[in-house]
Amino acid sequence: MAPRIPVADRTGHRTVPETTRRTDRIPGTRYGNRPTMKDVAARAGVGLKTVSRVVNGEPGVTPETERRVQEAIEALGFRRNDSARVLRKGRTASIGLVLEDLADPFYGPLSRAVEEVARAHGALLINGSSAEDADREQELVLALCARRVDGLVVIPAGDDHRYLAPEIKAGVATVFVDRPAGHIDVDVVVSDNFGGARDGVRHLIAHGHRRIGFIGDMPRIHTAAERLRGYRTAMEDAGITVADSWMSLGVTDPERVRRAAEEMLSGPDPVTAIFTGNNRVTVTVIRVLAGHARRVALVGFDDIELADLLQPGVTVVAQDAAALGRTAAERLFRQLDGTLLAPERIELPTRLITRGSGELPPAD
């Protein structure tokens, strides 16, 4: 058969035909079929128990036999099945983390903190995203339970978690973080969303603002509802009647947020300041204000990258995402160690970081 000749593409680079790339495989490779201890035993010419002793570091094997087994292991690329081993002990040495959105920068430090605690306890972290869908959250949680994870850290999308009750009863340690569970009694670690939002709006009021807009996430989400409550409380405490046109809650899609901000900034009595309910909303509002003629004060809930480099810098109510993840994971492993009794709600404080945007006075 004639050899395959590489051809030149439009850029002049020599390429291999697609059919070649599809058919070139490592001879004898069967993907998805890993070598077993039985395969190692056959190659080394020993019994299965001998391979088990070598793999698990047990005594009773001569140096020469151990050498032959190790050579067989290396040649075959054998790896010990830790899942099977730990299942015999009743633990899988793994935990699951269910996030709302893996692409959201807020969850990066939280996930990393959970992973570091898991690693310190010799456990593997498996995570996934619910995409703010309650059905997808339940599907993912139950899939993790089916894989026998020892525990779960859950940022919930839904508000009814009774489906988890049988799993918890069966021994799956569970901690909810960022938002509380619905209809089940478990550990929960949250930020002070109400107090943080109230402080942020009070800060704007202290700098002379009376017409303050609020743009937040969907009201069914616990954090969004709590931040709206903090906004309304701060305004009420200051004797300010809130107009309906000053509040907008919904998806954090940039187009929706942009429309809401532009509507608040237009008309005969536009807002002079905006309080944003999360980092994604803040980023869109910053873009809107960059093209706005009048300077408008801004305070956002959640810190954002490069907030200190903008002009002016963005004043934020910061929550400690890493502390949320670390605290939740530590609670989880204390459950697994049997050192926790009744479930608790832990609320971590927020911090107001002033950088300039929240200290601008009203333009009129």
Image (cartoon, rainbow, N blue to C red):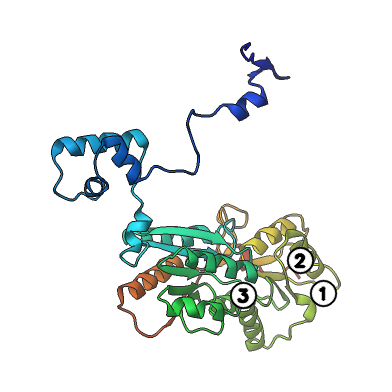
At a point 66% along the width and 22% down the height, the residue shown is 17
| Disc marking residue 158 | 3
The amino acid marked with disc number 1 is Asp
C-alpha gap between disc 2 and disc 1: 14 Å
Q: Position of residue 195 (x, y in %)?
A: 54, 80
The amino acid marked with disc number 2 is Ala
Question: Which of these two is toward me, 101 or 208?
Answer: 101
Dot placed on the residue nearer the N-terminal end, 2 or 1: 2
Given contact means CB atoms under 8 Å apart, are the residues at marks 2 and 1 in contact? no
Q: Secondary structure at mark 1?
A: loop
The quadrant where residue 199 appears: bottom right
Left or right of 160 on screen, residue 343: left
Question: Which of these two is toward me, 199 or 347?
Answer: 347
Left or right of 171 on screen, residue 193: right
Residue indicated by mark 2:
261
At a point 64% along the width and 15% down the height, the residue shown is 6
C-alpha gap between disc 3 and disc 1: 38 Å
